[in-house]
Amino acid sequence: MLGYLFLGAAFGILLNSKGYGWGWAVLMSVFIYAGSMQFVAIGLLSGPFLPLQAALMTLMVNARHTFYGISMLEKFKSMGRKKPYMVFSLTDETFSLLCSARAPEGVDENRFRLWVSFLDQIYWIVGSAAGGLIGSLVSFNTKGIDFVMTALFTVIFLEQWENNRNHIPALVGLGGSVLCLAEFGPGNFILPSMVLIVAILSLFRKASEKEETV
């Protein structure tokens, strides 16, 4: 809750600084709800109209959600009519929680996942609205405030590192990202790094499966 309230507030403040009131922040958080892409969208909204560039940028920024979705196939299979919302609401922090948190004893797993996802979005919406209102009432320098997304990803990474004994996926992710960053540059490394990470992890999985069958 605290994480999403502060992140949402940062988004609302930045959006307001570009001339979009708190109502726009709420609408984007209700219907787009894409975390880091909403921060990127601020620049797209305040710049020239370039739909192809916007589409490619969205693909680059949100490509990681493809892999989130694949890893959630089994967990969402029994969600029934709730499944479309679960897919829509699968953000970075929600994914981290759904991977690590367990429903309390006696609580239905599907109901637990639904409420985690729904409450996360509510926190984000409330934070966005609050940030938009604060931005309209108080004027201050917003330079560097978008660093909150980098901070979020760092916290998620550390949380997953502490909660899992197997650090190979994390090390593969770091190594693959650094390698692709050096090869393709900061503007184009995300998709190649995703492909490389999935390829390496798939090879590890196949190798471990072979060892288990021997």
Image: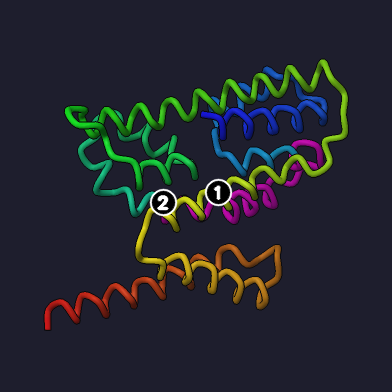
Element type where label 1 sits in the image: helix
Quadrant of residue 83 in the image?
Answer: top left
Please say whether residue 84 is one of the residues in the magenta stretch: no
Q: Residue at x 35, y 34 (%)?
A: 84
**Contact flag, marks 1 and 2 (Cβ < 8 Å):** no
Where does the image place residue 135, in percent across and percent down from the top left? 79, 22
Residue at disc 2, secondary structure: helix
* Residue that lies at the very extreme toward the bottom in this rendered image: 214
- Viewer-nearest residue: 59 or 127: 127
Q: Which residues are magenta?
A: 43-67
Residue annotated with mark 1 = 155
Identified at 69% across, 45% down, the residue is 51
Number of on-image labels: 2
At label 2, which amino acid type do we have? Answer: Tyr
The x and y percentages for residue 171 are 48, 70
Identify the amino acid type marked 1.
Val
